[in-house]
Amino acid sequence: MFYKDFFFQDDKLYYLIVAKKLTNEKLNLITCFMLFATILVVFLIMYFTHQSTIKSHLEQKDKMTTFFNDAMHELKTPLGVAMLNLSMMEFKNKNTHRIKSALKQMMITYEDIEYFIKNSKINFTKKVINLSSFLALRISFINAVAKSKNIKIIAHIKPNLYIFMSEIEATRLIDNTISNAIKYSNEGQKILINLHLENGMIVFVVKDFGIGIKDTSKIWQRYVREDRINGGFGLGLNIVLKICQKYAISKNVKSIYKQGSTFTYAIPAYKEKILDNIS
């Protein structure tokens, strides 16, 4: 190792280059020290960069959440007014039916996005639901969407089957499954819906004869759509997946490409408990 020194003599400055022999031990020690110092500097740079990025990301996330909440609130009122006024009109032509169908499809999409935003922040209140009656009401609501494609919904519902869950989440499960069947069915086809009790579980089945699904393993992923032509955000079945996981609902999908799909859910039947009212 070389280092430089200096001294004065007769008012003149002299530089002295000194050579000092290094042992392997000292060389290794210096190398380790330099390596440690380099790693420390890199770590500090990464840490402060990461902290800055996280802060920026959280701020942007808060802004986006506020924006979506405000936007959803602004959309809800005119959508509700349009639905109310349309329900008071006489349905005399196909155009009125199409408007009603479009509004109901918008309502389903709106409620999906609202649920997606609020799900991590709100505890939805659970209650005892007569799923038989509830399903019939949802079919009645969605039927306008089916009629716009001349699709006939045929339902076989066993009466007085009860579950214990949130009405909002029961709605999301039913609406998304049936609306998907309508979306991916061709005009003039039919959709079969069945609700029955089997081995202590309430089995909910939706069968369509539409375009089918090439890869059923991906349909539950967020933002994934089997067919991009029909549009949508790709949220619906991911929401259904989360609800199934939350309520221990088993799900099954069978599909043959260009022949149709069958979605089956086994929902735990309601059993009366003392703590039913606690969500």
Image: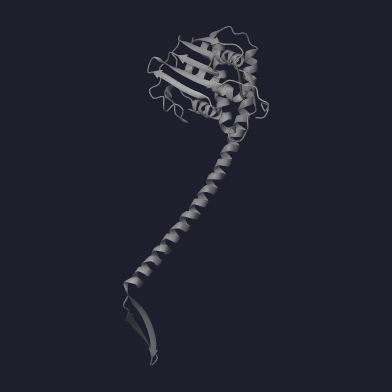
Instruction: Find residue 241 and report its horizontal and vertical position in percent.
Output: 50, 28
Q: Horizontally, is 218 left or right of 59 in the view? A: left
Q: Horizontally, is 77 left or right of 40 in the view? A: right
Instruction: Find residue 6 and report its horizontal and vertical position in percent.
Output: 38, 84
Q: Residue at x 33, y 81 (%)?
A: 18
Q: Is residue 139 visible?
A: yes
Front one among 260 and 144: 260
Q: Residue at x 32, y 71 (%)?
A: 24
Q: Quadrant of residue 35?
A: bottom left
Q: Horizontally, is 181 left or right of 259 in the view? A: right
Tell me the colour scheme of the image: one colour
Q: Is residue 106 visible?
A: no
Marker count (numbered) = 0
Q: Residue furthest top?
A: 92
Q: Quadrant of the N terminus?
A: bottom left
Front one among 10 and 153: 153
Front one among 52 and 38: 38
Instruction: Find residue 204 and report its horizontal and vertical position in percent.
Output: 52, 17
Q: Quadrant of the C terminus?
A: top right
Q: Quadrant of residue 75?
A: top right
Instruction: Find residue 40 and report its horizontal and vertical position in percent.
Output: 45, 61
Q: Horizontally, is 120 left or right of 254 in the view? A: right
Q: Quadrant of residue 90?
A: top right
Q: Residue at x 52, y 51 (%)?
A: 52
